[in-house]
Image: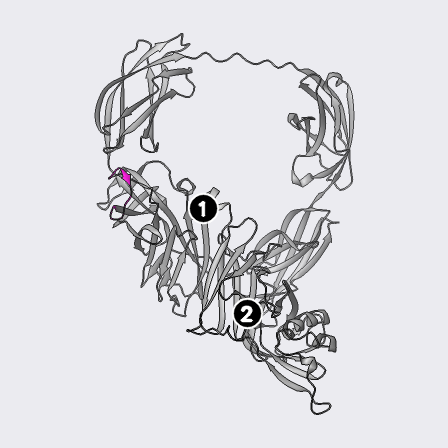
Amino acid sequence: MRERFKNSIGIPRRIGLALAGLLLVWSCVNFADLKSPLNGIKLLINYNIFNTFLSFSFVDAATGAPIGATDDQTVEVQISGDASTAVVDQLGNHKTSYSSVFGLLSLALNPKDPWKPTPQNKLGIQLDATCPNYKPASLNLQIDSAGKYQYKVMMEKTSVDALGIKKYVYQLNLNPLGELENDITLSSTGHEAILKLKKGTQFMGSTRAVDLSTYVNLTLTVYTRLNAAPVPGGLLENVLLKNNSVQQEALDLYRVVDVEISNGSLQTLTSLGINRMILRYKVDSLAYHPVTKTTVLPGNEAKTYTWLQNNSQWQLDDSLKIQSDSLGYYVESAISTTGIRAAGMHVNLCPMSGQLAYSLKGSFPTYPVSTLVSVYRKIDSRYIGNIRLDAPQNGTPVALNFNTPASTPVRSFISTYSGSDAFSATPNSFDFQAGCGTFGQVASTLTYTPPPPPVIIPTVPVSGNVTVSVGDGFSTDPFAITANIYQASNNQLLWSNSYSVGKNSNQFTINANLTPNTTVYLQILAANNQNSFTCTPANFTFNTSSATGLSWQFAVTPIYSTVNLNFNFTRSSDLPNSTYTVKAELINMADQSDVQDIIFSVVPGQSAYTTRLFLSKLIQYQVNLKRVDGAPVFMAYPYQFVLGNITQTDYSCSSELSPVVVKQESFTVKVICKQTEIIPTLHGYYRTVWEDLWQQTDIINGVLNISCEINSTYVVGMIVNGQMQTGTYLFDASTLNFNFNLDDADCSKMGW
């Protein structure tokens, strides 16, 4: 492993010192105090201090991405519990709070007594994580043996409650037979849905062939609000019953869950082989049971359903009993296919019929008077349906017929049908307690409501000529701008119009009618991002009482330019003739934030690719090439291009794609002081420059074993004092030895 763009093997001085600081402060002794018994011969010390490592990754539950991997967000972690004083950071310092880096946090346990974990000496540690815009998350650890512990902490955005959607993304590892390697239980944070998969489960595509990927991606979406689910929200729904008949039923859904599975090539997997998944739905204890007409209770019947997207209907699956445990009420069913699933209860519909007699009061301009009768379930106002009824002038009763859930009281409301004459109805609602059968005749009086007189707001004419000085950098073609007039006291928009301007047509006239004696200001804005600009002056303020024959002059300077980004992806002769997916990340060089991602499918026989972007002239840009997760593995060189400030309309980037050779490599690491050489044991991270996610690694007794891509560029990192210290290296087949050379000042800082 050698550093790219340098001739020597090793770590640059600034990185070496930072990483060496990590290695050295973990000692229980001060090596500067050690003296060699033989002059000129160094002591060799095995620096294996910690026996137990705790590694945490904090993940956005909706995307599966580490929190802070692409921005500056950090997760603040508080440590408490009986054994909290045993926890130390990578420098060996004990704290009560720590901060994540790129969604990662590495801690260890004090190896001294009484902090050696055993079955008889379990160490209890409580972790509480907080992050802006995320819900707090907690983790209770019970550690009874030394070793390496890795934890994934799923954190939900605070907005999920308002949106009613909780999404969780998991990667499931498979063996060469396409079988799940371990029993797995996946749960939403509120236990609204729990999914259980057994070891040996296989995943199949639409052809029923077992997928032999090394992993599959499972997405579990839980809809905590039913109106957030991508299914109809009415009470009456079509249901495919066990006898293959489709009937409209009154359907109460308790929980809606979507299970999606795809392989590394983003192909949807629709079914399971060998085993079935167990899906547990949480049932709210206040949920309404349409048979008992009360809230649900353990032992009540519940049913499960599958949403048939192509037919826009629900399919009845299982009839179950509601159970309860410490997590609440629930039903649990086995499923063998993916898709949208639900738990709930349905009852049959039956007709209600009768007559509605209208009396008309007042001078209605038109006849008949159209009314809308809307029907709702009385207990919870769930919508059932509506009927349009015309009330004739002679007062003849009209038939009122509708379907309703069996034995369910309903309530109807009378309102004006769209486009009809407005009225008030007395009474405007009727209750039907029986829920089925005939109800005889009900009556309502409709009183005509005349429309309110129009409100006349006095105005005065405002006019003026606007001259726009169009600066260099705009296209020679005319472009659209917007002229807005706002009230100065509250910034309320009073008037707006669009115009076309250019170098050869830079004048236009404003004619508006505005409230008299009002202080306002005129502002010129870009109509779209393609022609965004800065405007001088920002606005003109004037009074509408003397605003005729005015003249305004603005100068506009473009902010954005249309840029063609041209890529030439060549292939090495030994690269398999497949389609490769390349992501080009456009980076703001000032803060390294991701501005925009462009995805290219590099197909055989085509090397030239162009994308048109609208880029700011105020930002310096850099392009980083990345592999898309799940795509065929490849490497590209070069992988980084600097555009700088945008000064031209075309930029070209050429990169060669070549195959990846993966080998198991061993690296030796030593820390060298003036009088000692240290064989370290520590925890770190690495990733290729093509990837976004860090992989965890360990150097054990001075040896790092890793499966790496030969001739690929890697970033190796260590978290030191709340910051990720990194070095970039090219892994090749040469001898891979790292020597960290420290001076006396650095060596004297060792020990904790």
Q: Earlier in the sequence, mark 1 or mark 2?
A: 2
93 and 186: which is toward the camera: 93
State the extent of the magenta-drawn residues as a range: 292-300
Q: Is residue 451 magenta?
A: no
User: Would you name the residue on which mark 2 appears?
Assistant: 108
Q: Amino acid at mark 2?
A: Ala
Q: Nearer the viewer, mark 1 or mark 2?
A: 2
Left/right of residue 143 with respect to residue 434 in the rendered view: right
- Point out the image quarter for the C terminus: bottom right
Q: Mark 2 Cα within 10 Å, few/some/many (few <14, many 20+)?
A: many
Q: Amino acid at mark 1?
A: Ile
Q: Residue at x 67, y 58 (%)?
A: 653
User: Would you name the residue on which mark 1 appears?
Assistant: 165
Question: Measured along the vertical axis of the image, is residue 149 above or below residue 164?
Answer: below
Q: Residue at x 51, y 50 (%)?
A: 135
Question: Measured along the vertical axis of the image, is residue 348 above or below residue 281?
Answer: above
Image coords of residue 459 (percent x, y):
66, 15
